[in-house]
Amino acid sequence: MGEFRMPTLGADMVAGTLTEWYKHPGDVVNRGDIIAAVDTDKGSIDVEVFEDGVLERVVVEEGQKVPVGTLLAVIGSGAGAPAPAAAPSPPAAAAQVPPPTPPSAAAPAAPSPSAAPTAAPLPPAHGVRASPLARRLAADLRVDLTGITGSGPGGAIVKEDVEAAAARGGGDRSARMRRAIAAAMAKSNREIPHFYLATTIDLGAASAWLAQWNAAHPPAERLLPAVLLLKATALALLEFPELNARWEQESLQPAAEVHIGMVTSLRGGGLVIPAVHQVNRRTLPELMREVRELVQRARSGTLRSSDLTDGTVTVTSLGDRGADAVFGVIYPPQTALIGFGTPAERPWVVAGQVVPRQVVTASLAADHRASDGHRGGMFLATIARLLQQPEGL
């Protein structure tokens, strides 16, 4: 018999609202199936199950807000009943991934009905119907569409519904997200002994290879520089497993796979850190597709629980934002954050000659309990070396 509990959908999450059950008692569930939706400060998240069985009992009803670690449902083996055909996964079901790290023994137990804070039942967050104008206006006004009842044809959300929600204060999710991020980052700074390193990397070879690739492929198959940085980082982490790890219960726990959490800005304000899975195993075209799909899910509010719980390390890139370097704060319980500034053309010495070269500043924020400056410097040097041979990524 298994326990399905409120997951930790980010280091800044302490509670969530169960907004919808997609499965009901008696339904067969399979590993990877999306069975519920949870509302957090960062949006409505589809939550997956990580074992096969039968949903025997629902403990938390739709509309209830409960702490992380609270028992939501009980999943049984279904022994003694005829084995039904495997239920098809919903279209948004994720690939099979390892379950998130279970909550510690100190996680709060399921609250009694009298103690559990409740909220009014929310409308289903899955597949919100809204006009294109309403979606654009909601993004501009920072209004969460999942909290609006539509008055348009078939219950679709229209412009007037968004304006009314904004007037009622429906645009406060961004402010709540900012407060949650601030609390998590302040906690990280207090509790994690950070150290910082930076190096400047010559992108000449990588830029030339990327230009040749993109010239030979149609627009839909072209690559962005970010995927080369992600792949080089993932391959370097294989040589420095202490940076691809979690620090939990006063011990270092290296991860078996490299799942890179990619800092993503939302159109309505705020940040999320969804994970690109098994980056070291992906080809560059596969990685480009994964990144595009992940950013689209993040910005459309259709992230899954595994997107937010599986990250083993975080990468933040400023792209074309204009800053030479970024020195981030570690996302606990991870042990490292890698930053890339804006690539820029600089004078560079090549074979004794000063030539113009595109370079980027790579930075490392690392947990001193897990690593040290010597290992950190070698790690950044490994990323630089890998980017000199982009055809091998």
Image (cartoon, grey):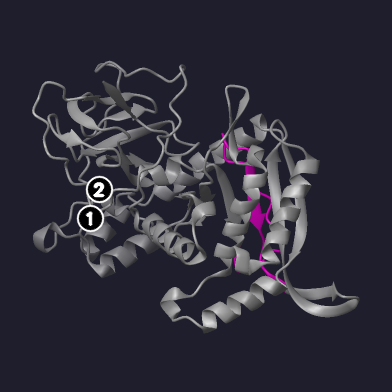
Front residue of this view, candidates 149 and 307: 307
Residue lying at the far right in this picture: please name it: 352
Neighbour class for label 1 at 10 Å: few (<14), some, many (≥20)? some
Relative vertical location of residue 355 with respect to residue 131 in this rendering, above or below: below
In which quadrant is the N terminus drawn?
top left
Return the residue nearer the eye: 148 or 219.
219
Say if the magenta span includes residue 323.
yes
- Assess whether mark 1 and mark 2 are in contact (beta carbons under 8 angstroms): yes
Q: Residue at x 44, y 35 (%)?
A: 13
Find residue 189 and report its horizontal and vertical position in percent: 66, 36
- Is any atom of residue 41 visible in this view? no
Q: Is residue 295 visible?
A: yes
Residue shown at 26% from the left, 42% from the top: 33
The residue nearer to you, when weighing 44 against 4, is 4
The dot on residue 125 is 2
Q: Position of residue 297 (x, y in %)?
A: 37, 57
Magenta region, residue range:
318-344
Q: Is residue 103 left or right of residue 363?
A: left
Q: What is the x, y in percent for residue 89?
A: 22, 47
Q: Residues within 10 Å of mark 2 (few under 14, many from 20)?
A: many
Residue depicted at 41% across the width and 37% down the height: 98
Q: From the image, which quarter does the C terminus lie in?
A: bottom right
Q: Which residue is mark 1?
A: 128
The CA span between labels 2 and 1 is 6 Å
Disc 1 marks a residue whose amino acid type is Val
Helix, strand, or loop for circle 2?
loop
Which secondary structure lies at badge 1? Answer: loop
